[in-house]
Image (tube, rainbow, N blue to C red):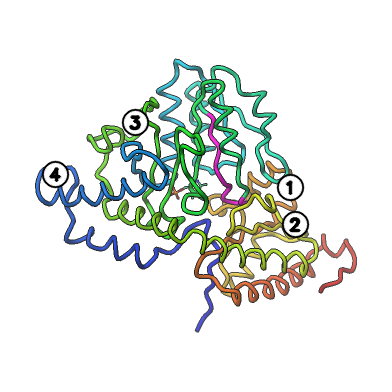
Amino acid sequence: MEKHIYFDHAATTPVDERVMQEMLPYFTEIFGNPNSQHYFGREAVKGVDKARDTIAKIINAKPNEVYFTAGGTEADNWALKGIARANKNKGNKIIISPIEHAAMLSTAKELVKEGFVVEYMQVDKDGLVDLNHLKTILTPGTILVGCMMANNEIGTIQPIKEIAKMAHEVGAFAFTDAVQTAGVLETDVKELGVDLMSMSSHKIYGPKGVGALYVRNGVKINSILTGGHQERMKRGGTTYVAGVVGFAKAFELAVEEREKNFEYVKGLRDRFIDRVMSEVPFVKLNGHREKRLPANADFSFEFIEGESILFSLDLAGIAVSSGSACSSGSLEPSHVLLAIGVPEALAHGSIRFTFGKHNTIEEIDYAVETIKTAVKRLREMSPLFKAQGEIKYV
Ligand SMILES: *Cc1c(COP(=O)(O)O)cnc(C)c1O
């Protein structure tokens, strides 16, 4: 059988069989529009309400603080645009980190066109937000401070609790994009102290195209998707009933099995990192070694192009990502790596490996061997590498 190994779980994950079973009736028997005032509508509402209760409970919020969206991108758009536009009276400044997901970065740029000022927190070489620098740009008149809880590319986990506290000290709202952490780390909105939080289903073995935004009661936010009265008048559009049911089930399973999956995936990841670091010369691990998502290993291989490694691995049946899935397709080096000070040439040689609960030790070892061979072969063709002289391989 042809080999297909999936090491790209930060891009998306397969739907868990149990999630799929939970969703199925909502495509057929329970197909009603939750806004309809009859039996079919009421049955659909039950599914949506249960999903909302489940998610609210997991994140320690009230059900009416959970708004369903079409995924993390919509939730990020909504948080930024909705808060900025509704709170113009408080000021015009928005602060985000330079290593956010494209959903945040592009939205912030849109807001600049509307007259808002966007400032960026500095991050250190591991991608951690510099809280001292944040302090200097947090002035009264700041509406919102937005920072991802963990980075999708290098896996670095941010001190969200501290950032939220600092935001509140100047009267700004605190927002976190928890797409990579919901279901993986504790995401209790009260404990984190955030006013808004984005989540997405397909990164945690749920269906694509569904997510949620937590908005603390009392926070003023405008709608961005205008239409009907859905989501308490805040988000028009018929709810993707099967999707939200699947999302809630996926989230529930992720939390129930969190410790087991965390330890298992981290074990695979650590074996992978240790082997690559000791067996492949001229390689750099990007991101913080400890404050890091358990599934993430992001490497820069000197003297070669990430794309060439990606294609060699793909030929060997191993699926990985160069840069983030959203910026691949362009040959621009990753904005995250540039922001943490990785030189452009090295950033070009970067590959992200993100592991999942179905991966095995055998797959890890096969990948290490494949990488060793591919890197050696590619470097032998690289003029840059030849200029370095003889290198010893382990
Ligand atoms: C995947 C991702 C998103 C986008 O979520 P979608 O549901 O795919 O729109 C946003 N932020 C982060 C950190 C992500 O990893």
Taking 207 as reference, is 373 above or below it? below
The amino acid type of the residue labelled 2 equals Lys
Residue located at (34% from left, 31% from top): 223
- Rendered location of residue 278, percent (x, y): 78, 67
| Amino acid tagged 4 | Ser
Q: Residues within 10 Å of mark 1 (few under 14, many from 20)?
A: many
Check contact, mark 2 vs mark 1: CB within 8 A.
yes
Q: Hey, which residue is sitting farthest right in the picture? A: 389
C-alpha separation, residue under disc 2 versus residue under disc 1: 10 Å
Callout 1: helix, strand or loop?
loop
Which residue is denoted by mark 2 in the rendering? 284
| Mark 3 → mark 4, Cα distance in angstroms | 22 Å
Q: Considering only order in the chain, which callout, 4 or 2, is on the residue closer to the N terminus?
A: 4
Quadrant of res 197: top left
Q: Which residue is mark 1?
A: 342
For the residues labelled 1 and 4, say whether their Cβ atoms are less than 8 Å apart.
no
Which residue in the protein does label 4 denote? 36
Q: Are marks 3 and 2 in contact (CB under 8 Å)?
A: no
User: Residue pushed farthest left?
Assistant: 38
Residue in the image at 51% along x and 54% along y: 184
- In the depicted structure, whether residue 149 falls above or below residue 86: below
Magenta span covers which residues? 145-155
**Label 3: how many residues lie within 10 Å, few (<14), some (14-19) or many (20+)?**
some
Q: Amino acid at mark 1?
A: Val
